[in-house]
Amino acid sequence: MTKKLYLTKAPAAKAGMLIRKPVSEVFEAFINPEITTKFWFTKSSGRLEAGRKITWTWEMYNSSGDVNVKEVEKDRRILVEWVYNGVLTPVEWIFTPYGKDAAYVSITNSGFGGDGDKVVEDALGSKGGFTWVLAGAKTYLEHGIKLGLIEDAFPKGLNTH
């Protein structure tokens, strides 16, 4: 017999990672598409600046999405809105200095829509995606290695069940 589950608060996707580079360098990697394309999307229409609408593209999936940049606090915080599975959701990055030469980056995506099952599924999917982004950023910034995590997550022609 399946037990019914009830949520007391809406799930949010939260991922975090320590990156052993100065906070200013890590922050720049997320607002500057010349760097971000090394570990996340493949094209961008521009840098993240408050008030701008940017388009990010993942060429390997023939997919793109618009990002409304709401706030940018240099070396501290980025807040954007983007559509996740048909719902406009906020995504917030917080950059916390850790010692002299490291930064802890936390990313939170919230505001998912639909029934409880869909909200939980979307929060888990978003958390997984942002975990890959942070792992790719860490590896690229610390070691100069492009792991290809995003493009290898859903390889063409692979049938899974």
Image: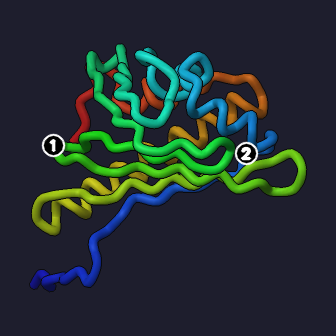
Can you give x and y, in whole percent of width and height, for residue 89 in the image?
Answer: 29, 50
Q: Where 7 falls versus 24 (above or below)?
A: below
Q: Where 66 falls versus 22 (above or below)?
A: above
**Would you say 19 lies left or right of 8 here?**
right
Considering depth in this image, is 77 or 157 the residue closer to the camera? Answer: 77
Q: Residue furthest front?
A: 51
Find out whether the residues at labels 1 and 2 contact each other: C-beta distance under 8 Å: no
Q: Which coloring applies here?
A: rainbow
Q: Residues within 10 Å of mark 2 (few under 14, many from 20)?
A: many
Can you give x and y, in whole percent of width and height, for residue 64 in the image?
Answer: 29, 23
Q: Residues within 10 Å of mark 1 (few under 14, many from 20)?
A: few
Q: Residue 19: which disc?
A: 2
Q: Residue 54: which disc?
A: none
Count of marks overlaid on the render:
2
Q: Residue furthest right?
A: 100
The image quarter containing residue 21 is top right
Which residue matches tag 1? 86
Q: Where 102 falls versus 49 (above or below)?
A: below
Can you give x and y, in whole percent of width and height, for residue 86 in the image?
Answer: 15, 43
**Would you say 49 lies left or right of 105 here?**
left
Query: Which amino acid type is shown beneath numbered disc 2?
Result: Ile
Query: Which amino acid type is shown beneath numbered disc 1?
Result: Gly
Q: Secondary structure at mark 1?
A: loop
Q: Tell which circle, 1 or 2, labels the residue nearer the N-terminal end.
A: 2
Considering depth in this image, is 1 or 76 the residue closer to the camera? Answer: 76
Can you give x and y, in whole percent of width and height, for residue 56 in the image?
Answer: 38, 23
Residue at screen point 53% across, 49% down: 93
**Alpha carbon distance from label 1 to label 2:** 32 Å
Residue at screen point 47% across, 45% down: 71
Residue at screen point 34% across, 58% down: 110
**Would you say 21 lies left or right of 43 here?**
right
Residue at screen point 56% across, 25% down: 36
